[in-house]
Image (cartoon, rainbow, N blue to C red):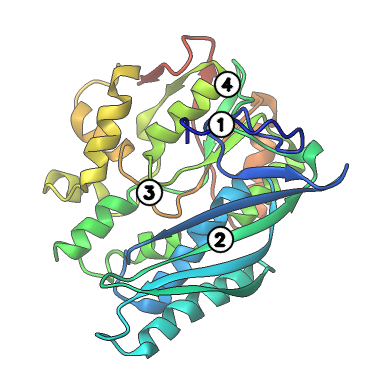
Amino acid sequence: MRQLPVLDDPNYLNRDQHFSDAGVYRISKTEAMVQSVDFFTPIVDDPYLFGQIAAANSMSDLYAMGARPLTALNIICFPASCYPLEIMESILRGGYDKVIEAEAVVLGGHSVEDPEPKYGLAVTGLVNPQHLVTGSGAAPGDVLVLTKPVGTGIIATAVKGEMISVEDAGPAIKGMAVLNASAAEAMLKIGVSAATDVTGFSFLGHLYEMLLSSEVGAEIEHKKIPLYPGVAEMVSMGMIPGGAYRNLEYVRPHVSWEGGDGKEDALIVLADPQTSGGLLVALPEEKADLYLKELKARGTDGHLVGRITGETAGEIKLF
């Protein structure tokens, strides 16, 4: 995209933000359209659950920016000549039910014959430009709250390697299917400095992008970052997705470790590529308790994991 001309449209509100979660286009003084698209290969064997997870993941970018999903279009690749269409129907049903849960509408979509199944959504939402949340507003003194555990990539790898049962992976599978709607609603009610969702670039990768955009650093207490059950054990057994190594290679030059023993295992967990992860929210310290209470009132957990500093932009210290 960097090789393409920059669009100089004043209604393209985040055209200068290189790490935005979604595109934002103003359509009136009080409304802006927020758009994003995502799709991927199955992360679970159950087609209905795959559809749910993919849909929740696709809408996550909108929630991270404080937007309300409005419409969705299915994007599905499926080997129709090899598998019964009932499987594709189950995938689409999972996505449809998750969109309905988000109080949005599926308008249709597009399908392609493909040897490997893939599914996701192109999503459009609305936000008041005055309430738009980006990843570029974090300020020194802000605290960082994470709303879901991490480790979905590791758990999915372990399930595929038959090192953990689907039943034992249940908490991670259930977590991936949970919408970030409640976390976003609480965020808008309290008012925050910045936010992003934690997905394929991992906790460290998305944090790094927020820090660069905000021109700040961060201190993270790595033991306060919640993990799904079984993650630490699976890491010790080598159940690590290739994307975790690529993510870690990208962020390692910007990370300093002061956390004692267990450095490499901790780093690989924090570099684990997430599917439908939680929101990572920066907000003034005096608002932290209010945000955590709002999350709990909506049935969502929140974890204080660190704070923003005035260090070099992008610098992450792990304690």
Residue sitting at 68 percent across and 68 percent down? Answer: 104
**Residue situated in front as seen by the camera: 264 or 108:** 108
Dot 1 crowding, Cα within 10 Å, few <14, some 14–19, many 20+: few
Q: CA distance from mark 1 to mark 3?
A: 31 Å
First-in-chain label (3 vs 4)? 4
First-in-chain label (4 vs 2)? 2
Residue sitting at 46 percent across and 31 percent down? Answer: 3
Are the two marked residues, 4 and 2, in contact with CB atoms closer than 8 angstroms?
no
Q: CA distance from mark 4 to mark 2?
A: 28 Å
Residue 132 locus on image (x, y percent): 72, 39
Question: Is residue 138 visible to us here?
Answer: yes
* Badge number at residue 122: 2
Dot 4 crowding, Cα within 10 Å, few <14, some 14–19, many 20+: many
Query: Disc 1 or disc 3, which is closer to the eye?
Result: 1
**Callout 2 amino acid:** Ala
First-in-chain label (3 vs 2)? 2
Determine whether the residue tagged by mark 1 lies in a helix, strand or loop: loop
Residue 66 locus on image (x, y percent): 68, 46
Determine whether the residue tagged by mark 2 lies in a helix, strand or loop: strand
Query: Disc 3 or disc 2, which is closer to the eye?
Result: 2
Residue 103 locus on image (x, y percent): 69, 69
**Callout 4 amino acid:** Ser
| Position of 6 relative to 115 (above/below) | above
Q: Is residue 62 left or right of residue 147?
A: right
Q: CA distance from mark 3 to mark 2?
A: 19 Å
**Callout 3 amino acid:** Gln
Q: Residue furthest top?
A: 311
Residue labelled with disc 3: 274
Residue labelled with disc 4: 214
Q: Residue furthest left?
A: 237
